[in-house]
Image (cartoon, helix red, strand yellow):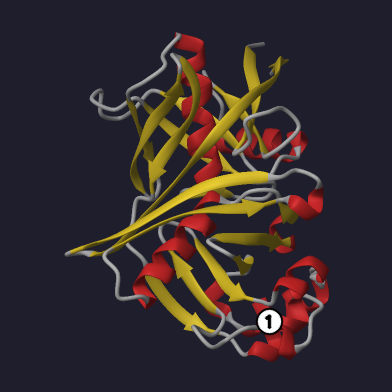
Amino acid sequence: MAEYEYLTVDVFAAYRFGGNPLAIFPRALGLDDWTMQALSAELNYSETTFVMPPADPANTALVRIFNRSSEMPFAGHPNVGTAFALALEKGRRSGTLRFEQRAGLVEVRLTERGGVLTGAEIDAPLSLRLMETFPVEDVAACLSLSAGDIVADQHPPVRASVGVDFVLVAVTPEALTKASPDLGAFRRLAGARPALGGRLSMFLYALAGTEVRARMFAPLAGTWEDPATGSANAALAALRLHLSGADRLQYEAVQGVEMGRESRLSLRAWRTPEGVRAGVGGACASMFRGSVSL
């Protein structure tokens, strides 16, 4: 019987009990796919990461990311939180970590203030990819809203990705607060769109001055609501830049307020010859340590 240590951090918050909780197994070599998925479901966080030796010794680690029901090719808060946790264990305060993942190589830059490690920031591994759009009425039904609550003057509800896909939906500020996922409507829409492969995650947002307020629902994956979704926020930053005439974009986003877990994310987007890229970063706070014998 082997013992595997794990630790948890709150990501995109500078204090405990905020942000998005993440569990990390820093020495996961020996765990098979079924066990990693079972551990992720048991811990019941939106994601859990498993750190293993890299295929290329020039990189820091191979990092596999599981949500409650499946493995993910990439995600924002797992990369930020895993880098923070590994750096904290090694006493590092700065530098770049390179994580091998299914979506590609992810570089994570540590951030510090006054000589103290505070968090990390990443560049999403892929350029913006825009896919199909969705009828306003169908999306509104998924969010328990009316069609008039959806704001479509800049873009219709659209599936977009910078490593993992989300349906990006602009709503009014009032609708953002009152939205709630309708599981039946999610199932019907996912069933009518075979290209989704049964995965349907909706990221709704409203502009609040220079900031963005956001929420994310993925009930088909077991996440009724996510306190902070780095990959979705990065996809939105890339889309917003794509729709503008600017070369760069930078702003702050707030998520998780309705859950009592306020999260603050720093977003960047920039144009390249290959397309629009985006990045996300934020603070982290350490929480629990434990182990499991398997």
The correct choice, above or below, for 133 with respect to 291 in the image is below
The correct choice, above or below, for 293 with respect to 191 in the image is above
Q: Quadrant of the C terminus?
A: top right
Q: Residue at x 71, y 40 (%)?
A: 45
Q: Residue at x 62, y 67 (%)?
A: 205
Q: Residue at x 64, y 40 (%)?
A: 37
Where residue 268 sits in the image (x, y, percent)? 39, 53
Q: Residue at x 30, y 30 (%)?
A: 55
Give the camera-side residue of 187 and 130: 130
Q: Amino acid at mark 1?
A: Val
Where residue 138 sits in the image (x, y, percent)? 70, 86
Task: Indicate the secondary structure of the residue bearing disc 1.
Answer: helix
Where residue 41 sits in the image (x, y, percent)? 73, 40
Would you say residue 75 is visible in this rendering?
no
The correct choice, above or below, for 92 with respect to 153 in the image is above
Residue for badge 1? 139
Q: Quadrant of the N terminus?
A: top right
Q: Quadrant of residue 157?
A: bottom right
Give the camera-side residue of 87 and 258: 258
Total numbered labels: 1
Would you say residue 256 is visible in this rendering?
yes
